[in-house]
Image (tube, rainbow, N blue to C red):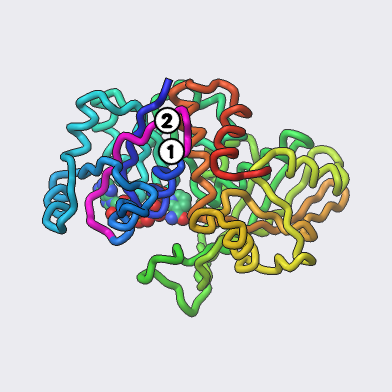
């Protein structure tokens, strides 16, 4: 069986998800949809672009007019495509809050939906991170792939919790200001704290792992490449440094990089993925600085980096398999996705 998928919203996340769907042998990208003739939409549809010859639809009537007026070939309205029963799953990658507005349309036509982390948790039946709760999403009608920050916390904390139990966690998030392509938002010369504690990522993590006692604090800084998290906490049972590193590595989609090997900053880590010739230098893994992993009795500490544009892409692919039930075993789905994206861990 091949799952027929449409992606709505071809921006930072949507263009990557659509590209990743094309790499799967059990999925077919039947359409993409947007509301604006953006430079990135034009680029991915060019003959050398990753989405060349993909059918383009408009997400609403204004978008149809706008894109046609801008000279783009648009097949019609996404809603008409959904009504024609040619789509099994829509991956909604529209800006935060729009997915919730689209929900009624997806439900009307009985199309399953994958939403993104910019939506409230109640948009979907399950908030999803593959390794942590794939089973919960099996055959659901909708899932929300949580944000980039929450995905990184869920993968790493799941690893420790499963192996040793977690008593409590404090994570301090130093967030990139915006995505590298985006010239508009700042800050350009300020550190902007999120003064409400816990910041929203802690409660968001609990939508995936409800029993983890976590507090998060966050700020935005003038950097665009990656978020950096300072994570500390207490385990339920003692573990050695080697046991903790082993648990993190064997969980998957987590890579330990050494500052002593030259990976001294987020820029050096991102450069690694440029040099590995990953598409768009995407780092799908959480990168933990190896030397930062520290254990004192039951206390643990580490620092990790998150490539915000890329980390949720493999989760979106696994989410499609989970909600359609085409693969019931999370490890098989994860392995298949990893192989298609060149993830070695
Ligand atoms: P984006 O702004 O890069 O792209 C959004 C795309 O949707 C654009 O192409 C825009 O033209 C299109 N769009 C706008 N209104 C639309 C509508 N009504 N219908 C269809 N398309 C519409 O946004 P993004 O960064 O890709 O974010 C998408 C979702 O992914 C959000 O929920 C966001 O929180 C989440 N997310 C973003 C990142 C990140 O780093 N950018 C990381 C993880 C999760």
At which x and y percent is residue 284? Answer: 57, 49
Q: In this view, does 145 lie above or below 271?
A: above
Q: Give the range drawn in magenta.
A: 21-38
**Pick the front one: 22 or 40:** 22
* Disc number for residue 153: none
Circle nearer the N terminus (1, 2): 1
At which x and y percent is residue 89? Answer: 36, 30
Q: Does the residue labelled 2 lie within 8 Å of ligand 1?
A: no
**Pick the front one: 103 or 56:** 56
Q: Quadrant of residue 100?
A: top left
Secondary structure of the residue carrying tag 1 is helix
Q: Is residue 103 above or below residue 302?
A: above
CA–CA distance in space, label 1 to label 2: 6 Å
Secondary structure of the residue carrying tag 2 is strand
Q: Quadrant of the C terminus?
A: top right
At which x and y percent is residue 114? Answer: 40, 35
Residue 30 on the magenta segment: yes
- According to the picture, the residue beneath numbered tag 1 turns out to be 21
Q: In this view, does 302 lie to the left or right of 37?
A: right
- Is there CB contact under 8 Å for labels 1 and 2? yes
**Pick the front one: 49 or 331:** 49
Seen at 15% across and 58% down, the residue is 70
- According to the picture, the residue beneath numbered tag 2 turns out to be 27
Seen at 54% across and 49% down, the residue is 311
At which x and y percent is residue 11? Answer: 36, 53
Residue found at the far bottom of this picture: 189
Q: In this view, does 110 lie to the left or right of 330?
A: left
Q: Taking the image as drawn, is residue 231 in sight?
A: yes
Q: In this view, does 329 lie above or below 175?
A: above
Residue 286 on the magenta segment: no
Seen at 78% across and 42% down, the residue is 235
């Amino acid at each position: 069986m091949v799952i027929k998928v449409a992606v709505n919203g071809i921006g930072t996340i949507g263009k990557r998800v659509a590209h990743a769907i094309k790499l799967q042998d059990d999925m077919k990208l039947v359409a993409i949809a947007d509301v604006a003739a953006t430079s990135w939409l034009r680029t991915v549809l060019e003959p050398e672009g990753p989405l060349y010859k993909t059918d383009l639809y408009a997400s609403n009537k204004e978008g149809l007019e706008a894109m046609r007026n801008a000279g783009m070939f648009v097949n019609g309205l996404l809603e008409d495509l959904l009504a024609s029963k040619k789509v099994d799953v829509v991956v909604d990658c529209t800006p935060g809050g729009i997915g919730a507005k689209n929900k009624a349309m997806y439900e009307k036509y009985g199309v399953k939906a994958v939403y993104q982390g910019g939506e409230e948790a109640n948009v979907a039946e399950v908030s999803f991170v593959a390794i942590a709760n794939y089973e919960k999403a099996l055959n659901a009608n909708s899932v929300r792939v949580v944000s980039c920050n929450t995905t990184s916390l869920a993968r790493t904390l799941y690893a420790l919790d499963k192996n040793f139990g977690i008593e409590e966690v404090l994570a301090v998030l130093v967030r990139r200001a915006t995505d590298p392509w985006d010239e508009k938002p700042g800050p350009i010369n300020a550190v902007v704290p999120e003064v409400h504690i816990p910041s929203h990522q802690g409660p968001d993590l609990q939508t995936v792992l409800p029993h983890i006692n976590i507090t998060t604090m966050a700020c935005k800084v003038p950097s665009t490449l990656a978020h950096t998290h300072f994570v500390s906490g207490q385990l339920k049972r003692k573990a050695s440094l080697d046991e903790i590193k082993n648990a993190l590595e064997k969980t998957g989609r987590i890579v330990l990089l050494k500052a002593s090997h030259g990976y001294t900053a987020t820029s050096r880590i991102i450069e690694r993925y440029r040099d590995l010739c990953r598409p768009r230098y995407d780092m799908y893994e959480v990168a933990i600085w190896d030397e930062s992993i520290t254990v004192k009795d039951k206390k643990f500490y580490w620092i990790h980096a998150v490539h915000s544009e890329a980390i949720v892409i493999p989760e979106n692919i696994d989410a499609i398999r989970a909600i359609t039930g085409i693969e019931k075993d999370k490890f098989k789905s994860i392995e298949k996705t990893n192989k298609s994206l060149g993830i070695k861990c």
